[in-house]
Image: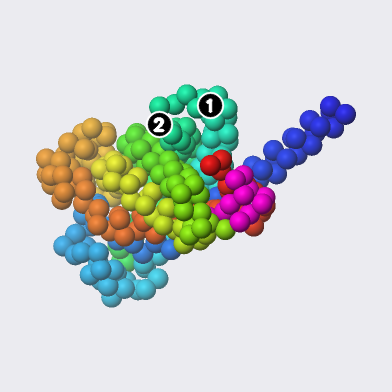
């Protein structure tokens, strides 16, 4: 009987992980596709593309369509999809696993309510980005290219070119340290804020923000508008803390695209120093922040909402103890 019980539990664990991987991967693809044009103009502005650095967000989007084509708004999105499915699948699933075991290990001994969600989210983000970082470098290179000035012909060609000419695997991980440092507050605050707001909605405003769901812990499920609101706020908070390191990462990833920007490939602290000395805080470390809010808020909102909707469809628990 014990072996049957163990086998059944093992099957349930595999099913739980598979369903979370599927839900997380699809959620990531939906969220990134929704903001792909904003992602591209953000990269062009962050790295001071000579064709776009004098433009704003909306004028830059119009210029992309005029200079290149409408589909150029989605340049690099193919590489993004190849990266984002395993990234988001790993991140969401790792969060569920870390949250489960941290909750048991830490109990209620933490000074801040739901602080285990921050730790689990940060660890999940670090896990996901470590596994998929080279694909992010490739996607950034493809998105930075302007029609008529192409150096790369696709995902594989980009990967091989970087590997052969810029220093092997290390080149594909250029900018990895600031990414890791930025991922801790970004993923940590994203998951913490979403889970905390979800708790507040379920505890203090269930009649407005929730529907009955007997299958869930607590017997409630967030309505879609409430999911979007919680996710959007979580994205805004997370990006505010982590954005300067995102700019640093992009500069390092794109450093070898032009001889004049090679100085940004000399290490994280050196790159941060150069950006600050040349452009200051708002025009350097927080350059493109307005567009980042425009993209991060809907992106995180769609990501969390899609993930929770798919979990519900797959009969997974999206409730919590209240």
Residue that numbered label 2 is attached to? 112
Depth check: give the residue in front, 112 or 102: 112
Q: CB under 8 Å between callouts 1 and 2? A: no
Q: Is residue 62 visible?
A: yes
Q: Is residue 51 visible?
A: no
Residue located 44% across and 26% down the image: 110
Depth check: give the residue in front, 284 or 321: 321
Depth check: give the residue in front, 22 or 171: 22
Residue located 57% across and 53% down the image: 221
Secondary structure of residue under mark 2? loop
The span from disc 1 to disc 2 (Cα, nearest Å) is 12 Å
Residue 172 vs residue 203: left or right? left
Badge number at residue 107: 1
Classify mark 1: residues with Cα within 10 Å, few (<14), some (14-19) or many (20+): few
**Is 199 contained in the magenta span?**
no
Q: Residue 229, how many percent across, how many down?
A: 41, 57
Range of the magenta residues? 212-222
Which residue in the rendered view is the most extreme toward the bottom?
66
Compare marks 1 and 2 and give the one earlier in the sequence: 1
Classify mark 2: residues with Cα within 10 Å, few (<14), some (14-19) or many (20+): few
**Is 219 contained in the magenta span?**
yes
Residue located 20% across and 64% down the image: 56
Q: Residue 159, how many percent across, how many down?
A: 44, 47
Say above or below: 149 vs 175. Answer: below
Q: Residue 23, how many percent across, how many down?
A: 59, 52
The quadrant of the rendering that contains the N terminus is top right
Say above or below: 311 vs 149. Answer: above
């Amino acid at each position: 009987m014990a072996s049957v019980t163990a086998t059944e539990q093992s099957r349930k664990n595999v099913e739980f992980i598979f369903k979370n991987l599927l839900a997380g991967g699809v959620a990531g693809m939906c969220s990134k596709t929704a903001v792909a044009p904003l992602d591209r103009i953000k990269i062009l502005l962050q790295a001071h593309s000579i064709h776009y650095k004098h433009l704003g967000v909306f004028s830059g989007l119009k210029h992309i369509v005029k200079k290149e084509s409408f589909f150029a708004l989605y340049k690099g999105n193919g590489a993004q999809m190849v990266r984002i499915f395993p990234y988001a699948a790993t991140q969401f699933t790792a969060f569920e696993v870390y949250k489960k075991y941290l909750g048991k290990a830490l109990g209620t001994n933490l000074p801040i309510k739901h602080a285990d969600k921050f730790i689990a989210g940060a660890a999940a983000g670090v896990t996901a980005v470590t596994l998929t970082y080279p694909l992010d470098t490739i996607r950034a290179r493809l998105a930075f290219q302007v029609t008529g000035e192409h150096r790369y012909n696709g995902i594989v060609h980009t990967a091989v070119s970087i590997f052969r000419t810029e220093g092997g695997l290390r080149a594909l991980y250029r900018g990895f340290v600031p990414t890791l440092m930025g991922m801790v507050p970004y993923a940590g605050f994203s998951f913490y804020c979403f889970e905390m707001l979800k708790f507040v909605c379920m505890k203090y405003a269930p009649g407005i923000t929730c529907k009955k769901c007997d299958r869930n812990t607590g017997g409630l499920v967030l309505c879609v508008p409430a999911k979007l609101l919680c996710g959007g706020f979580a994205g805004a908070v997370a990006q505010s803390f982590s954005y300067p390191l995102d700019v640093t990462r992009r500069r390092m990833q794109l450093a070898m695209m032009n001889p004049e920007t090679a100085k940004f490939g000399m290490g994280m602290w050196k790159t941060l120093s150069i950006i600050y000395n040349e452009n200051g805080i708002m025009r350097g470390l927080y350059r493109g922040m307005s567009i980042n809010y425009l993209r991060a808020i809907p992106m995180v909102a769609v990501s969390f909402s899609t993930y929770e909707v798919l979990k519900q469809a797959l009969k997974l628990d999206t409730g919590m103890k209240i």
